[in-house]
Image: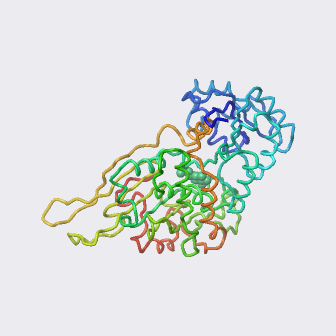
Amino acid sequence: MRTSAHSDAVVFFGATGDLAYKMIFPALQGLVKAGRLSVPVLGVAQPRWSDEQLRARARDSIAEHGGIDEAAFAKLSRLLRYVHGDYNDADTFRRLARALGVSRRPLYYLAIPPALFPSTISRLKSVPGYKTARVVVEKPFGRDLPSARALNRLLLSEFRESSIFRIDHYLGKEPVQNLMYFRFSNWFLEPLWNRDHVKSVQITMAENFGVRGRGKVYDEMGAIRDVVQNHMLQVVACLAMEPPQEFSPETLRDEKAALLKSIAPLGKDDVVRGQFRGYRKEPGVAPDSRVETFAALRLRLKAPRWKGVPFFIRAGKSLAATCTEALVEFKAPARTAFGERLLGRGDVNYLRFRLGPKVAIALGVRSKTPGEPMMGELSELVAVDRHAGEMGPYERLLGDAMRGEAMLFAREDSVEAAWRVVQPVLGDQVPLREYDPGTWGPSQADGLAAPYGGWHNPGVDGRGAVS
Ligand code: BG6
């Protein structure tokens, strides 16, 4: 199969579920609106629904998440069909084959719990076109290194790696792509982007809300599995990877994988785990849960470019703000001229990448304040400051998967390398600290970043307002 051959049908399992409701239907309408989707779209799930019920569900979903565009929705409705049945029942797949009709290159989207993958994947073999099919899977890709390997083995037993699309929606975000673009397209950065000039790198993913009704699912994961192993480590890879020799999806993914492989597995002293007060009362959460809703960690990269430069990550729920931001702070030279007392945390030169909810790229610089003393103030040269683009990550990623474009998907080796990094600190191995909702997490986290001037709290010191 030519990898560029367009999928001629989309089949999404889990059509009545949460992921379809929040993400997939709105992305499908976006694709139709952009003229990028005109093939049949089949939703599969257990309830005995009709096509009309699926369309009504799609309408509710899109009305709630982004808004209905009547013309695009009408087109999408004409493409939508529903297939009911148990994923363990051969009849379901016979019905699916009939509904697919002449389609021979379907894109299968497994928006279902991983426990249902084995039976679903093995039964797909009975559906014509399975050899030229593509399959999309969602994070979590396993829950630790052994289960990720088992999942990869399962997928690779039926599909080639080039037909497997692992969605990490961070990779579909415009500002995450811009991390790489900005780095490699601004030539003055390359001589500075290394251990000689970078003091530390910090990434904060703060959310000022709790688990929003996902208590049961979240309580099986915690922050490290939910966002660090995937989103945060992918952001680290974009910030720290070597430039690829040439621009191609595989060379880019090779460099990312190489970077992730160069991160030392975390030690217990590298991590602070926290749980916000009140988490255990959330519906679905175990009353004695030891699961973290906050994690702060210090990564050590063995890549020569970064030897000795700490990469800090902090991610949590019920924090003081909602904001994802990376701060790359530059080192002071051996001699500074004016002897100003600086606080030493992002008050001289840095690059700030705000990834959401707003998007910004800003360079922190000092200039003299008017008056007699040779004293200055920090300001920012702002390269980007805008709302996130029109195209949401799911729309981008689904469209790419239909065209067989793999660049923005996580490859098997990257996924396993990322699990290798967090594996030693999964579960309840690191003490769990309580923190109050609305703060920046447990105070014990401060110690991690203290030798490097402490944590940068997005929105503080006038560096971009936060919600
Ligand atoms: C998801 C996590 O993958 O990413 C959620 O499961 C988290 O817990 C979400 O809230 C954050 O995504 P975004 O795009 O809002 O930063």
Report the side of 8 relative to 252 (left or right): right
Q: Residue at x 65, y 73 (%)?
A: 429
- Observer-nearest residue: 251 or 331? 251
For residue 9, what is the image quadrant? Answer: top right
**Residue 463 locus on image (x, y percent):** 36, 56
- Counting labels gives 0
- Observer-nearest residue: 140 or 132? 132
Tell me the quadrant of the picture where the N terminus can be found. top right
**Residue 154 locus on image (x, y percent):** 75, 52
Q: Residue at x 79, y 40 (%)?
A: 124
- Observer-nearest residue: 138 or 406? 406
**Residue 153 locus on image (x, y percent):** 73, 54
For residue 458, what is the image quadrant? Answer: bottom left
**Residue 290 locus on image (x, y percent):** 66, 69
When the figure is inspected, residue 126 is found, relative to residue 79, above or below; the finding is: below
Q: Residue at x 46, y 56 (%)?
A: 242
Give the color scheme: rainbow, by chain, secondary structure or one colour.
rainbow
When the figure is inspected, residue 266 is found, relative to residue 151, above or below; the finding is: below
Looking at the image, the residue that sits furthest to the front is: 245
Looking at the image, the residue that sits furthest to the left is: 372
When the figure is inspected, residue 156 is found, relative to residue 25, above or below; the finding is: below
Q: Residue at x 33, y 55 (%)?
A: 363
Report the side of 391 relative to 52 (left or right): left
Report the side of 254 relative to 428 (left or right): left
